[in-house]
Image: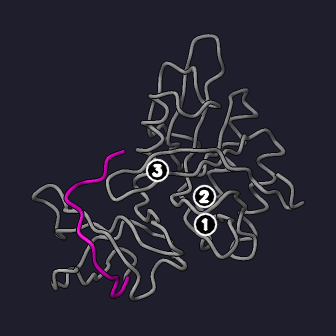
Amino acid sequence: MLLPQPMAHGRLVARYKRFFADVALDDGRLVTAHCPNPGAMLGLNAPGLGAWVSPAGGPKRKLAWTLELVEADGGLVGVNTLHPNRLVAEALAAGAIAELAGYGVHRREVRMGEASRVDFVLEEPGRPSCWLEVKNCHLHRGGALAEFPDCVAARSARHLRELTARVAEGARAVQLFVIQRTDCDRFAACADLDPAYAAGLLAAAAAGVEVLCYGCDISVQDIRIARRLPWIHASGRP
């Protein structure tokens, strides 16, 4: 997936009100960028971190820039939570996610349950439909472990319950974590920040929901889904 160009580099001054980030650009300008990330952004919101912003498209945008990447732990981290669905759409079209290949129809934003929409429904004659929910992951607190979520995620826990219901109906259901960083080689649910979600992920998996985790390759030009990472269970084994 190509990132909007030309990107501008600077230093993060402050991230506030969830969706705003002040960035001091290298050319001396101080700009306020849209921060498309509702999470806590732990470890990625400290003043002074390198940051890359993209020019906003469209006359209706109130802010002229969008925060795309943060430099942390020696690498680039994608913080735009709108990108994982786009990344997955491209990967599905290219057959780049082996576990999800072979479906000719990829429907997006399909109603699921009473109050949710699933990111994708994959369909192919002769196969059960596949309900696919995508989550962005960029929390890293040491070692090479990626974690989700970085704050209490009640909505995400509801999605797990609804995916479980699809399995009970005879469909296939998949929870896919897209890890927008390059320094992780495994994934775990973050039980200390949201024990209910961690327990819910284990319960969903036990009920037949498939858990997939994929890392990305990231540059200031593009991001792409690159490799499968193991999910580390509560037992400590993938």
Q: CA distance from mark 1 to mark 3?
A: 17 Å
Pointer 2 residue: 156
**Residue 206 at x, y percent in the picture:** 84, 45
First reached walking from the N terminus: tag 1 or tag 3: 3
Q: Residue at x 37, y 78 (%)?
A: 50
The residue lying at 54 percent from left, 27 percent from top is 122
Q: Which residue is situated farthest in the front direction here? A: 74
Magenta stretch encompasses residue 5: yes
Left or right, 78 with reference to 236: left
Q: Residue at 47%, 22% (x, y): give it.
A: 105
SS for dot 3 = helix
Q: Is residue 140 left or right of residue 136?
A: right
Q: Nearer the viewer, residue 53 or 158?
A: 53
Instruction: Check if mark 1's residue and mark 2's residue have beta carbons within 8 Å.
Output: yes
The residues tagged by marks 1 and 2 sit, at their Cα atoms, a distance apart of: 5 Å
Q: Quadrant of residue 179?
A: bottom right
Q: Which residues are magenta?
A: 1-15
- Residue depicted at x 58% and y 39%: 132
Q: Amino acid at mark 2?
A: Ser
* Residue sitting nearer the eye, 105 or 188: 188
Q: Residue furthest top?
A: 126
Q: Nearer the viewer, mark 1 or mark 3?
A: 3
**Element class at badge 1:** loop
Disc 1: which residue? 153
Question: Going from the N terminus, do you reach mark 2 or mark 3 first?
Answer: 3
Residue 173, how many percent across, how many down? 67, 36
Amino acid under label 1?
A: Ala
Badge 3 local density, few (<14 within 10 Å), some, or many (20+)? Answer: many
**Disc 3 residue type (three-letter):** Pro
Crowd band around label 2 with a 10 angstrom C-alpha radius: few (<14), some (14–19), many (20+): some
Q: Can you tell which quarter of the image residue 65 is in?
A: bottom left
